[in-house]
Amino acid sequence: MTPPRSEQGFVRMPDAEFEAMLARAAEKGAKRALADVGLDGEEAALDIRDLRSLLDCIRLVRRTAMQTAVRMITTGVMLALLAGIAIKLKIFSGSP
């Protein structure tokens, strides 16, 4: 039995059959991609949760490091300003 063809020579198939074939191909491709990166098997969901948790921790550390750096720079600038004011007003000059 030869499949039906259009005027241009393309093979025609019912839409439902085509959609089912696409779904099977997508599922096979997704499974192969997960297997290629080692996320197949019984513990794949646990591995993905662990990876997401690790990414959340990295983001938290990055945010905390940035906040700490900004606080240290701000504190340094404030100390420099206070030292400049103290020198300008001769607060610690020692002479009466």
Image: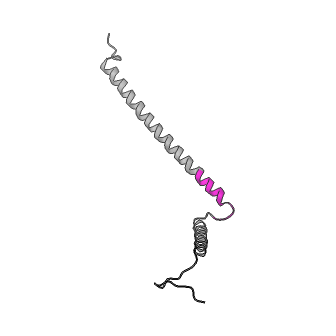
Question: What quarter of the picture does the C terminus occupy?
Answer: top left
- Which residue reaches farthest left? 88
Residue 17 percent location from the top left of the image? 60, 75
Front residue of this view, candidates 19 and 34: 19
Q: Is 51 within the magenta?
A: yes
Q: Is residue 65 left or right of residue 1?
A: left
Residue 39: quarter of image: bottom right
State whether residue 29 is above or below residue 91: below
Query: Where is residue 49 shown, x and y percent of the image?
Result: 62, 54
Residue 69: image location, x then y, percent: 44, 38
Residue at the extreme top of the image, as rendered: 96
- As drawn, the residue found furthest toward the bottom would be 1
- Characterize the magenta stretch by its predominant secondary structure: helix
Q: Camera-side residue: 20 or 92?
A: 20
Give the residue at x 33% y 24%: 84
Q: Quadrant of residue 76?
A: top left
Residue drawn 33% across the image and 21% down it: 85
Name above or below for residue 81 compared with residue 37.
above
Percent across and percent down for residue 34 are: 59, 65
Q: Coloring scheme of the render?
A: one colour
The residue depicted at 63 percent of the width and 57 percent of the height is 47
Task: Residue at 43% x, 36% y: name it.
Answer: 70
Specify the quadrant that holds the N terminus.
Answer: bottom right
Work out which residue is located at the far front of the displayed protein and give it. 7
* Highlighted magenta segment, given as a residue range: 40-52
Number of numbered discs visible in the structure rendering? 0
